[in-house]
Image (cartoon, grey):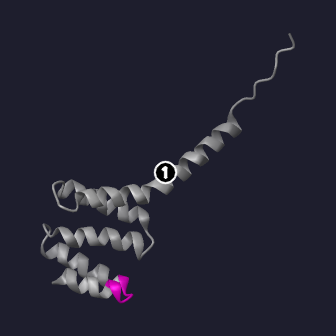
Amino acid sequence: MRTDLGNAYRFSGRPQKALEQYEIAQKQNPQHENSLFNQGSLYAFSLNQPEKALEIWHEYLARFPQSSNAAKTRELISQVEGPQSNERSGVTRWLKSRTQPTLTPSGR
């Protein structure tokens, strides 16, 4: 019931109120999968906090590895991590290229 109320808040543009309801649902029943899954989605897509979303989704997979939402959770993690991982890789490559010693021809 709390998760449904959270969804109503979320889809009416009140993400903080939604988060409150999802958190209450988790406290009342830590085995309630959807309230935890929805927290991750809320952080990723409504609150613009992808790091927190990833943290919650990884917790979700640790707690509910056989869930029917496990595959979807892995897909969402991949989507959220993908751009960040690529960006970090690009920055790392650029930094390495800037700090690598340049080889000059030997005068032979």
| Residue 68 included in the magenta stretch of the image | no
Mark 1 residue type: Ser
Label 1 sits on a secondary structure element that is: helix
Q: Quadrant of the N terminus?
A: bottom left
Residue ranking furthest to the top: 108
Residue 70: name its quadrant.
Answer: bottom left
The residue shown at (24%, 77%) is 22
Q: Quadrant of residue 48?
A: bottom left
For residue 62, side relative to residue 77 (left or right): left
Quarter placement of the C terminus: top right
Q: Position of residue 40 (x, y in %)?
A: 32, 68
In this image, 87 relative to 20: left or right? right
Residue at 21%, 80% in the rendered image = 3
Please state if 80 lies on the left or on the right of 103 as rendered.
left
Viewer-proximal residue among 41 and 102: 41
Of residue 81 and residue 28, the one placed in the foreground of this image is: 81
> Residue 38 at x, y = what percent?
28, 72
Above or below residue 82? Residue 40 is below
Residue drawn at point x = 39 percent, y = 87 percent = 13
The residue lying furthest to the right in this view is 107
Give the left or right position of residue 32, taking residue 21 as reference: left
**Label 1 crowd (10 A; few <14 / some 14-19 / many >=20):** few
* Residue 92 coordinates in the image, percent (x, y): 59, 44
Q: How many numbered marks are there?
A: 1
- Residue interval drawn in magenta: 10-15
Residue beneath disc 1: 85
Does 78 appear above or below 106?
below
**Residue 24 position within the rendered picture, expressed as x and y whole percent measured from the top left:** 20, 79
Q: Residue at x 30, y 63 (%)?
A: 56
